[in-house]
Amino acid sequence: MTDHALRLLRENPRLAELTAFPFGFDIARAAHGHVEEVRLASGGPLEVVAGDDTGGTYFVCADGSVLYADSEGSAGIIGSSVDEALEIRIGLAEVEDDEDDGEEEPGQRRELARARAELRAAFGFPERSAAELEAMLRAALLRTEPDFVLLNDLEHNAYQLLDSHPRPPLWEPVLASGHADLALLRAGDRTTWEELAEDAVRRRLALRAAQFDRAEGDLELLRHLLRHETKSSMTDELRLAAVLVGLRGDPEDLPLLHEVRETDFDTACGLSEIPEPGASAEELLEWARGLDDSLFGTDPSDEPVSTWTDLARDQGMTELARVTLIRELDEIVMDRSGLRRPDAPHALTTAPLGALARDFEELGDLPQALRAQRLYAALQEMAWDRASAMYTQAGLERGAGLLSEAVRSLAAVRDALTTPGDDSLRHWQNVNLGRFIAEEHYRLTRALADADLADEARTLLTAADAILGELSENAARGVRELAEETAARVREVS
């Protein structure tokens, strides 16, 4: 990383003028900033160092990489440093077409060549072929995701990529360690077997690798992983391991499968359709093939994206998971047709939005969680669903410090309770929904008090107490301690 070229540009007006025109790197435009407020999805710092006459902006990131963002919503890394970005820009720049006076083009080319030579000499850039520079640019652009994705800081949507170079599918980097561990298991070292099987993440990844790389000799290691996966209770990978064992069609595995099924209540429900002991090989195969066809299969691209984002997050590939989820949410925001139900084209299934909100919350990305949750709440039609979505939204807003917004969300919850418009909330006082709504009222009241917003806290406490007063005895029992503590805190600030 070096700022040699940038320092020279700031010291030498002649060089600054040449890079501004004809090479479109104008340090004087840095003072104007970008056309809108932006930030990196990864949260790293950005420094505006130059702009161009199309509204584009050059940013320097924490590691020195240069991110270029145009005014149309695309962005990408164009060099590992200002020096590299300028070397590429200067080396690959061409004369712009002049439709009005084509005979000027040779002169323009000579002017460009002279400017290029002067700048290369001043900056100490080596002579490189266009092919070398294009390879450098391609390598830089391919580093944009996942660490340098640019977001609109108001709407939180991501800028598109500057380029159309193919990227590996998400499952490739996510499964890389799983394939390596599967190879270790196949090598047969028993110490490795125990170490790997005791690690929940490595175990899950090895099972996913075995899903797509099936070998006849894997039965014993699959049995081993299956036994250990019970420690995580009813996971998708537990069902996968049972299916992979069942696909061998050996009735002698039925006692093991039943032992796994009886691990706890959840596994008993999740694996309830395993054939009973004494079933034939054909019955075992029919069960395993049916689940394999409906839930698993051998093509990783057929898996829901959440499979790979969950596994990415569990391996610490946080930015890879975050960027994938942001792109998923952006697609839904731009085109809700993807939410249409195949069996009812005029109806929407909002479950993907709810799942995205939870995924972002687990990543600690509350702005994106709120973006997903707000759209999820806005699309709910039944009063129960609206009330449930809005109190969840209020909790996210409280966690993000958006207390006024959270107060408004809880007001919408109370509106749904008092004027539901349907009968879905007729028993809200007797069930967990009522309890959860009351709890969120008290938690937000406490947050208001802690923020020295005494009047707002007292007002919301009155509403919380009114909701508590409507709950059944069973529903209210778990809320009273929180209510008393909250009331005491409000008295302290009043």
Image (cartoon, helix red, strand yellow):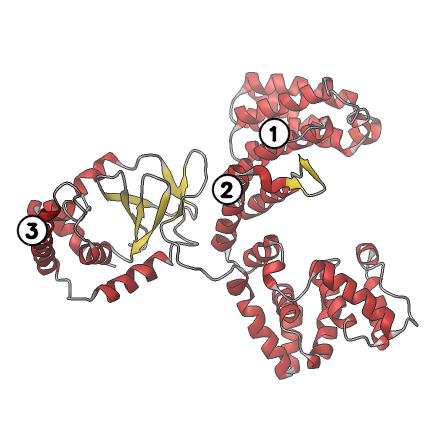
Q: Which image quadrant for residue 383?
A: top right
Q: In which quarter of the image is the N terminus?
A: bottom left
Residue type at numbered disc 3 = Gly
Which numbered disc, 1 or 3, marks the residue that appears first in the sequence? 3
Which numbered disc, 2 or 1, marks the residue that appears first in the sequence? 2
Rounded to the nearest whole Å, what is the CA distance between mark 1 and mark 3?
Answer: 60 Å
- Label 2 environment density (alpha carbons within 10 Å; few <14, some 14–19, many ≥20): some
Q: Is residue 283 left or right of residue 379?
A: right
Residue bearing the label numbered 3: 107
Residue bearing the label numbered 1: 378
- Of 479 and 294, nearer the camera is 294
Q: Residue 92 — which label?
A: none
Residue 199, x across and y down, in percent: 63, 67
- Label 1 environment density (alpha carbons within 10 Å; few <14, some 14–19, many ≥20): few
Element at label 1: helix
Q: Is residue 153 left or right of residue 256?
A: left
Q: In which quarter of the image is the C terminus?
A: top right
Closer mark to the observer between disc 1 and disc 3? 3
Residue 183, x across and y down, in percent: 59, 78
Q: Which residue is drawn at 75% across and 57% down?
A: 234
Decide: is 24 above or below 294: above
Residue type at numbered disc 2 = Asp
Element at label 2: helix
Rounded to the nearest whole Å, what is the CA distance between mark 3 and mark 2?
Answer: 46 Å
Q: Residue 330 — which label?
A: 2
